[in-house]
Structure formats: C-alpha cells, structure tokens
Amino acid sequence: MNKKITILGIESSCDETAVSIVQEENGKIKILSNIVSSQFDIHREFGGVVPELAARAHVEKIDLIAEKAISESKINIEDIDAVAATAGPGLIVCLTVGLNFGKTISASLSKPFIAVNHLEGHALSPKLNTNLKFPYLLLLISGGHTQYLSVENLGNYKRLGTTIDDALGEAFDKTAKIIGIEFPGGPKIEKYAKQGDGNRFNLPKPILNRGGCNLSFAGLKTAILRIQSEIKNEQDKFDLAASFQKTVEKILYEKTKIAFKMYLNQNKNFKKTFVVAGGVAANKGIKDKLTKLSEDNKFECIFPDISLCSDNAAMIALVGLEKYKKKLFDKLNFKVNPRWQLDEKAQFLKGAGVKI
Ligand code: KG4
Ligand code: ZN
C-alpha cells in the first residue's frame, strides 16, 4: 500500500518565522517546502533579539509564510495529516504566536495537533538528509543550549553534559559583538578566523580537565573583554576571531572524547553514531575537527545539511511526523513551555556554587 503522511510544521521560538511541509512516502522523507523568514534587520540596531519586536514580526508574517509554504509544497491544505508547532523552549511571547496559529489550523481542519520541543527538532534534524537511526550520541550546539545527550528513542533523552553558563552560540555572538561585528555575528567569526593567527591570543579553556563532559564558556568571554583594548585594527580582529575559533575547537574536541566514553559506558552495545546539530553545527572548523575525532574513535559522525542547522520548521514537521506515527497527539490546551528540557530529570547546573 502506498502510505503517505504529510505534516505541516510551524516554528516561532525566537527570531525566525518558519513553516514547512514534510512528507513521508513508503518510508522516504521529503521536504516539500521549507520557508524561513529571519528578522535580522529588525534586531540589528539593538545588537540582539528584542522579544516584543520578534513576537510582533511573527504575528505580521506567519500567515504569509504559511501560505507560501503550502503553495510551494503543491499540496492541498486539506490533505495534511497533522499540524506540529514548537511549544518550547524559547521566548514565551514568540512561542505563543506559532503555537496558537498551529492550534487554529488544527481545529479548523479537524486534524491532530502535535506540540514539539524545539530541541527535539534539532536532535532529529539529520534524519531529513540521512538514514539516522536510534540510539546515538548528540552534541546540541545552538544559541541557547549546549548539551551532550544520549538519544535512545523518540522522546527518550539522557543528558550526559551541559554548559554551566553560556551556550556556545551565545559565546560566538558575544565574541563577535566585542570584536565589533554586527548582529548576528556568530557565523562571521569563522570568516574572520580564516584570515587570522589562532596562536596570537591565549584564551582560557574553563573546566577542560574536570566536570566530565560539562562545558563552560563564560570565562572565555571575560578574557576577550579584557583583550578588547588591544584590538586596534582589522588584523587584530582576525587574530582574536581565529584564537576564539581554535579554543572552541579544542574544548569541543576534548569534551567530545569524554562524551564518547560516557555514552558507551551506559551500554557498550550502543551504536557508535555521533550527531552534531543546532545553529553552531554550521561551523566548518568545528565540523572538520569533530569528524576527524569521530573517525579516530570509529564513530560515524553525522551533521544535518547546512541549510537545516539553524532554526527551521522542517525539523519541527519531522518531529511531528515521528510523533504522528506513534499517535502522540496533544490537546488544544497544550501550554507553551519556555524552559522545556529534553531530559527533564537532569539536574539544573547553572549559576554560582554549582557542583559539577
Ligand atoms: O539553532 P539556532 O539557529 O537557534 C537557536 O535555537 O538558538 O542557533 C543560532 C546560533 C547563533 O548563536 C549563531 O551565532 C550560531 O548559531 N551560528 C554559528 C554559525 N552559524 C550560526 N556559530 C558559529 N559558526 C557558525 N557558522
Ligand atoms: Zn534552535
């Protein structure tokens, strides 16, 4: 039998308004449309995302983006099987826009509604371009989260390590700001780094030799703030960007080695698959370094397609698809959950005095 499942996905957790249609036919997943509208121009003058402005832009754009996604997919809206929308984590005012929009479509078409954890979207995203199977070790590196997780099944996550302060994407963005690169600066650090000397500045690698595969990036930012007064010309900026990029690569390299061991310690029969996902997974230097480490440790290393690293709705529709197959539907009174974690049993590890 030719079985088709078609899911409409909606994402609005931060500063991207996104709608996508994903379809599975005979076990093969296809992205029929994937429309993302970024709000960089709105937030640039403030040097970061302003929640109220982001929410307003979602309200203004979401129906247009949805219309575009539906028309590009060439499906008839009545033919979708379910609506999936991000319910958290993220900015509450932003999440509310997409979640309510999704609930409205679901109610008006009488189709099941599925609330999606944004991080689960990142976690599963390589399934859109590879034949990824559970279980696997995940390094999630985005603007708000940095975690090593053992992904055992849909909805079954065990956190092995986390940042105890800043997320890695945040560290990239803050470094860019200090160097004087316009928001969103994170992706540009890598370009600057290519022209610089990574050995020029010696930056700290906090908790490198303790705390298992927990990570810390706040000390790096403080060190860069101190160096700021030495930055006089473009070459200094390139050198600082290169030193930051090199330090981050080294930290991830060492912490991933520990995460490999911790993952296999749980179950030595776990498949040696290592997934790196989230916005920072678009960083080529990190990708090359972690791919090499994986090869040396006989792990298969999988990254999402670069177009699917940063926030998008295809990954949300994908989680919707997986949940749909298990009939994991949600009620229309499902509340936004701005702090929704993948491993809800994991200990809170942020702030002064935390023991790692
Ligand atoms: O996953 P994402 O799109 O949004 C969140 O869920 O947070 O990640 C955005 C983060 C930003 O901090 C951005 O600076 C960072 O990913 N990012 C990068 C690169 N591309 C995006 N960081 C380093 N190198 C890149 N090439
Ligand atoms: Zn994200």
Image (cartoon, helix red, strand yellow):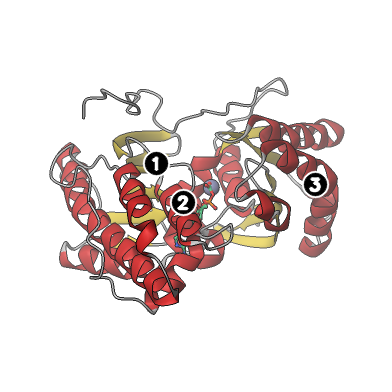
Q: Quadrant of residue 233?
A: bottom left
Whether tag 1 and tag 2 are in contact, CB under 8 A, the answer is yes
Location of residue 172 with respect to 52 vertically, above or below: below
**Is residue 153 rendered to the left or right of residue 127?**
left
Residue nearer the viewer, 92 or 258: 92
Quarter of the image that includes the N terminus: bottom right
Q: Disc number at residue 62?
A: 3
The residue lying at 43 percent from left, 42 percent from top is 145
Q: Disc number at residue 166?
A: 1
**Is residue 104 rendered to the left or right of residue 311?**
right
Q: Secondary structure at mark 1?
A: loop
Q: CA distance from mark 3 to mark 1?
A: 30 Å
Identified by mark 1, the residue type is: Asp
Whether tag 3 and tag 1 are in contact, CB under 8 A, the answer is no
Q: Position of residue 118 (x, y in %)?
A: 55, 41
| Residue where numbered disc 2 is placed | 174
Q: CA distance from mark 2 to mark 3?
A: 29 Å
